[in-house]
Image: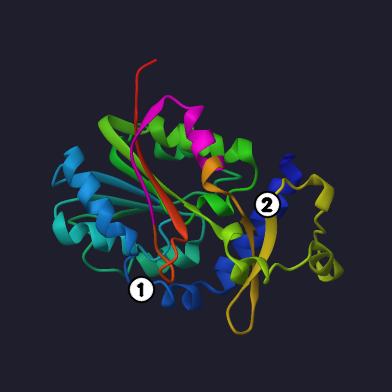
Amino acid sequence: MDRATARALSAINQRFYTERAAEFSATRKGPWAGWTRLSEVLEAAGLPPAARVLDVGCGNARLGRFLARTRPALRYTGLDGSEALLAIARKAEGLGPAPDFVRVDLVEDDLATALGDRRFDLAACFGLLHHVPGRAQRRALLETLLAQLAPGGLLALTCWRLARFARFRDRIVAWERWNEAAAEPIDPARLEPGDHLLPFGADPGLRYVHFAHQDETADLLAELACETLATWTADGKGDGQNRYFVVRPVSD
């Protein structure tokens, strides 16, 4: 995907999460069902009580609150591209002794530079990959996160399996409709298969989403120097909307 198209897609989501942050956050209060299994996997892998956790695409920091229930000493860093969502996250309680927040635009900014020499015991990338435009950019994100892990660290991520469900497929908004009123039209010929617009809310706002499938995500991970410790399907209305992967780096 060319950079101009990636920027235009990212701008759609930047606008959405600026204008609809409070509304979106209000629908994202409780933990995901799959996080119960996540806790078991992290415990079995020996995640320390004072784990350094990087929550990429943290939103209102609900993952941090969930993890801190059993690890109150964790050192939490929430990272998001939306300053409006970070403002909500900064007000959250129960995030360990000294939570930190970083605004990073994953299209415009260099993540490794933004994080510097920080290293993490766990990097979590939940509900995010479908907002990252372009396969190459998604691969680069996962590669960077693996490089930011401390020895023994883990990367946990999800693939939102949108394409499997008619209730998502039936709501896709045509790019032609977007282009009718857009200041920055999107050329559909420059998109990758699975790139769509999806409405949110009763007075719908539009988000760019990539309808990935679990094999696509598994293929990305297979290209990287990591091994999969666990994978499972959970969340949604009992039908497994998310595919989880927990991996760790391996030496070449």
Is residue 168 visible from the viewing direction of this image?
A: yes
Q: Is residue 110 visible?
A: no
Q: Secondary structure at mark 2?
A: loop
User: Which residue corresponds to the image point at 53% horizontal and 56% vertical from the top-left?
Assistant: 161
How packed mark 1 is, by other alpha carbons closer than 10 Å (few <14, some 14-19, many 20 or more), is: few
Q: Residue at x 65, y 43 (%)?
A: 134
> Please, what is the three-letter code of the amino acid marked with disc 1?
Lys
Mark 2 and mark 1: Cα distance apart in space? 28 Å
Q: Is residue 182 above or below residue 126?
A: below
Q: Amino acid at mark 2?
A: Gly
In the image, is 151 to the left or to the right of 206? left
Name the quadrant of the C terminus.
top left
Task: Depth check: give the residue in front, 45 or 81.
Answer: 45
In the rendered image, residue 45 lying in the magenta stretch gets the answer no
- Taking the spot 62% from the left edge, 35% from the top edge, the residue there is 136
Q: Secondary structure at mark 1?
A: loop
Q: Is residue 228 magenta?
A: yes
Magenta stretch in the rendered image: 216-233
Q: Which residue position is annotated with label 2? A: 194
On the image, numbered disc 1 is attached to which residue? 29
How far across and down, in percent of the image, does residue 192 sit? Answer: 72, 45
Of 131 and 54, nearer the camera is 131
Judge from the rendering whether residue 185 lies leftward or rightward of residue 3; answer left or right: right
> Quick one: which residue is furthest to the bottom in this view?
202
